[in-house]
Amino acid sequence: MRILIAEDDPAIAAGVSASLRQGGHAVDHVADGARADAALRDTPYDLLILDLGLPALDGSDVLQRLRKRGSGLPVLVVTAREGLRERVRVLDLGADDYLVKPFALAEFEARVRALLRRYTAQGAPELLIGKLRLDLPGHRAWLGETPLELTAREFGLLEALAARPDRVTSRAQLIEALCSWDEELTDNGLDIAIYRLRRKLADSGTQVRTIRGLGYLLEELKNGDAKINETRADETKDSQA
């Protein structure tokens, strides 16, 4: 998942960013409302963590503009402003949840998981494709009942493909989903991640299929289907990683 944090307190921003990145998310951070509004216009996100007391443009205005554009992006407001009237006001503006500072990091992480679970996989807590079972918000995967061990990048790749069932995901979309502004992923790095993910999905009844000239598709193999796994990633040896 790719998450935007709009927070002008450096300590809070650093703490929640580290927590989210440790959970395998790609995280972007802005420290004022104007930059948050611009980022939300230009980049597709899966969640917005929004402080209300932002410079340049108040967080309430950022939220109003987001909803006026018709976006259904889930928004967790994190603010020092408390009181029932303020919470009601912000929820009525379109926030999905509200957390008052100071807060326990464990509660923040639980609220993030709850919001992502609500808005991913069409609201289903788990996604099933062949023998592959995914808990996207919890960043867990199984083949049948056996846990599937994935690196953060491999899970991010699987997540980006699973979030678009029966639709082709381009290389550019995969790179964008896997990287925040301060990270970089080369074409060769993406090929290696795809190659390794395919190896771990072997005999799972699920494949990452190459759609020539367009991108990739995560699909369940039917009886008699042949695996279509020829890409540059398949030709990449582990020694090149």
Image (tube, helix red, strand yellow):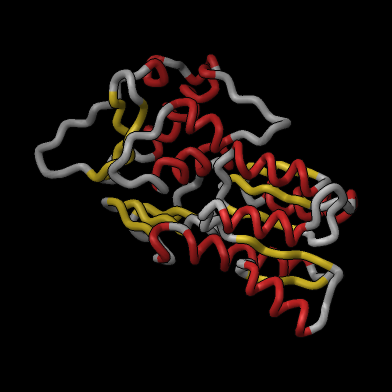
Q: Is residue 182 left or right of residue 128?
A: right
Nearest the eye: 42 or 196? 42
Instruction: Name the residue located 34 percent from the left edge and 51 percent from the top edge.
Output: 132
Q: Is residue 37 left or right of residue 221?
A: right
Is residue 180 placed above or below 149 in the rendered structure? Answer: above
Instruction: Name the residue located 29 percent from the left edge and 26 percent from the top edge.
Output: 211
**Could you say which quadrant of the image residue 102 lies in?**
bottom right
The count of marks equals 0
Q: Position of residue 130 (x, y in %)?
A: 26, 51
Q: Assign the C terminus to one quadrant of the image.
A: top right
Q: Position of residue 96 (x, y in %)?
A: 60, 68
Instruction: Name the residue located 85 percent from the left edge and 60 percent from the top edge.
Output: 53
Is residue 70 placed above or below 167 in the rendered structure? Answer: below
Instruction: Name the residue located 42 percent from the left edge and 48 percent from the top edge.
Output: 163
Nearest the eye: 154 or 182? 182
Specify the farthest residue to the left: 224
Q: Position of residue 115 (x, y in %)?
A: 57, 65
Q: Is residue 16 left or right of residue 151?
A: right
Q: Position of residue 114 (x, y in %)?
A: 57, 68
